[in-house]
Image: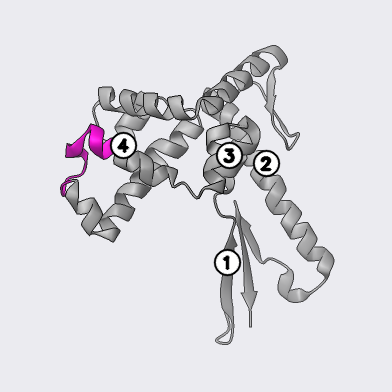
Amino acid sequence: PLALDEVVVSFDYGQIQARNVGMESLDRALLDAFWSDYDIHADFMEHLARLYPRWVKEGVAALARDPKLRSKYRNDVKHGFVFASFFGAGANKTSGELGVPLRVGEQLAEIFWDRFGGIRKWHQHLERDYYRTGYVTGHSGYRRRAPVSYNERINAPIQADEAKIVLDAMTRLSKIDHDLLQANMEIHDDLTFIWP
């Protein structure tokens, strides 16, 4: 339990998984997006709202009027489509996640892969290497050996990169040798501290 004079302070790596997808795939459009502050989730929310207006139950015009509603639909696309696509989900999966007809999910995926074709090429490269070598790997050097599902083959290099980056940060903080800089907890891309 926390003492009354303590606070929990949490630091989260912004966009670490998307950035790892960019590092691994070297997709030019995704890399450019980071430099131009392009909001991929909002963009594909708007694409989906245009393709299938009934998806926005409150009406498409409400997205411009209500920031909380916009944030909700943006998050739905972020988790149900963009990150799912990064990690190899097909239109069947993303359509179900978003509650839209399969044909709409296929149209949205076509727009996505036209823009971010380097990610799809990276997925295909992982597949070829997996069947050739019996494992997948990425910049971290960590090897995920067969048998591994399709989504795990794509996910493993990203999560291994993420773990290596976060553990590197923890190591660097430990080398400073100050009690306040020793993380009390690490969860995925988050370092949490308890400070006075």
Task: Tell which tag, 4 or 2, sits nearer the viewer.
Answer: 4
Mark 2 secondary-structure assignment: helix
Mark 4, Cα crowd under 10 Å, few <14 / some 14-19 / many 20+, is: some
- Which residue corresponds to mark 2? 161
Image point (61%, 40%), residue name: 20
Q: Are marks 3 and 2 in contact (CB under 8 Å)?
A: no
Task: Tell which tag, 1 or 4, sits nearer the viewer.
Answer: 4
Does the magenta run of residues contain 71? no
Q: Position of residue 162 (x, y in %)?
A: 64, 45
- Which residue corresponds to mark 3? 31
Does the magenta run of residues contain 53? yes
Alpha carbon distance from label 3 to label 2 = 17 Å
Boundaries of the magenta span: 48-59
Tell me: residue 69, above or below residue 142: below
Viewer-proximal residue, 182 or 23?
A: 23
Point out the tag, 1 or 4, that comes first from the N-terminus.
1
Point out the tag, 4 or 3, that comes first from the N-terminus.
3
Circle 3: residue type? Leu
Alpha carbon distance from label 1 to label 4 = 34 Å
Point out the tag, 1 or 3, that comes first from the N-terminus.
1
Position of 35 compared to 77: left or right? right
Circle 1: residue type? Ser
Alpha carbon distance from label 1 to label 3 = 27 Å
* Quarter of the image with the C terminus in it: bottom right
Circle 2: residue type? Asp
Q: Position of residue 73 (x, y in %)?
A: 30, 48
- Which residue corresponds to mark 1? 10
Mark 1, Cα crowd under 10 Å, few <14 / some 14-19 / many 20+, is: some
- Which residue corresponds to mark 4? 47
Alpha carbon distance from label 4 to label 3 = 20 Å
